[in-house]
Image (spheres, helix red, strand yellow):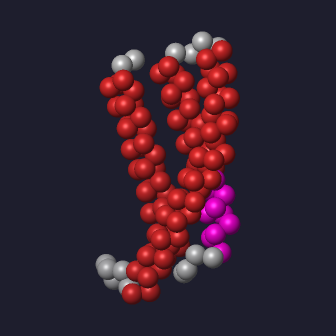
Amino acid sequence: MSEAEKLQLIQELELEMMADMYNRMSNACHKKCVPPKYSEPDLGKGEAVCIDRCVAKYLDIHDRVGKKLTALSSPRRRLYEENARRTKMNEHTIMLVSARFSRKLTVTLHFRWLNRMSGFLPG
């Protein structure tokens, strides 16, 4: 696999993870801040404030989780990659496995955070 192909793959995985995070954030904040039945097409002031706060908290926690994940996953990722090399996986497979490991851990931490924070979000 060439360097250009590796870079393309990494960019595609990052884009997929960003889209996934955006969708989860949108769904969580919409569920928390917008009632299921509404009569006006536009957000009310309270709903808009709620969504602003929810998104700000979500992004702040996403940043914190990302930093913590980086600190926690570096040794684990190296071990995981070393095990993959021992089993003679090719570089492409190692990169995919490593990216999926990070994504799985990120998603797990986000869901734990959402479960904890659901009582603290404005609404």
- Quarter of the image that includes the C terminus: bottom right
Q: Position of residue 36 (x, y in %)?
A: 48, 74
Q: Position of residue 94 (x, y in %)?
A: 54, 24
56 relative position to 7: left or right: right
On the image, which quarter does residue 103 sit in?
top right
Q: Is residue 82 above or below residue 68?
A: above
Q: Nearer the viewer, residue 104 or 92?
A: 92
Q: What's the magenta region?
A: 109-119
- Quarter of the image that includes the N terminus: top left
Residue plotted at (44% across, 63% down): 26
- Considering every residue shown, the one lying at the far top of the view is 88
Residue plotted at (41% across, 34% down): 10
Q: Is residue 88 above or below residue 47?
A: above
Is residue 39 something that shows in the picture? Answer: no
Q: Is residue 63 above or below residue 57?
A: above
- Residue 107 magenta-highlighted: no
Q: Position of residue 110 (x, y in %)?
A: 59, 56
